[in-house]
Image: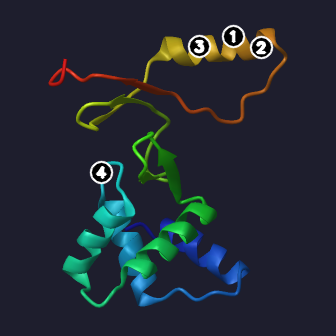
Amino acid sequence: MDSKEIDILEDYISENNLKITKQRRIVLKSFLECKNHISVEELYNIVLKTEPKIGLATVYRTLALLTKSGLALEMDFGDGQKRYESSYRSAHHDHMVCTECGKIIEFTHPLIEKYQEEVAKENSFKITSHKLDLFGHCQDCK
């Protein structure tokens, strides 16, 4: 885990009069090691392998802190379960979500980015962020 991530979390925590605990560090480390979009319950199961005494509520609260501090992005792919990914380690990308099996495929396409910028310019609009999720069936579920 980079010290930059710890610094970001520590800055946020100190600005809000909180403490950086061993449990929060473990949750952060486990979260940053994940390469996919992870639910709280999935992260909790990973954390338990390192520290079985950490409770589910601690993971929920720590993910909320990571989201508020800007280290995590909270996503809703319409399956009733929030998922999270690192905002620090991942470059911008969009998602294709299989409505059959739940598989999430990350992608980038320069034309999509270009067209978004063109549409914004035509409408005198400044894009500060965007989210594109395409829903359908993956190759395995066609």
Question: Which of 58/51 is in front?
Answer: 58
Q: Residues within 10 Å of mark 1 (few under 14, many from 20)?
A: few
Q: What residue type is labelled 3?
A: Lys
The label shown at residue 121 is: 2
Where disc 2 sits, the SS reads helix
Inter-mark Cα distance, 1 to 4: 32 Å
Label 3 to label 1, Cα distance in Å? 6 Å
Q: In this view, does 40 lie to the left or right of 111?
A: left
Residue depicted at x 48% and y 89%: 21
Q: Does 31 sit above or below residue 104?
A: below
Q: What residue type is labelled 4?
A: Lys
Classify mark 1: helix, strand or loop: helix
Identify the amino acid type marked 1.
Glu
Q: Relative to 84, is 120 above or below? A: above
Q: Give the spatial CA distance, label 4 vs label 3.
A: 27 Å
Labels 1 and 4 touching (C-beta < 8 A): no
- The residue identified by callout 4 is 35
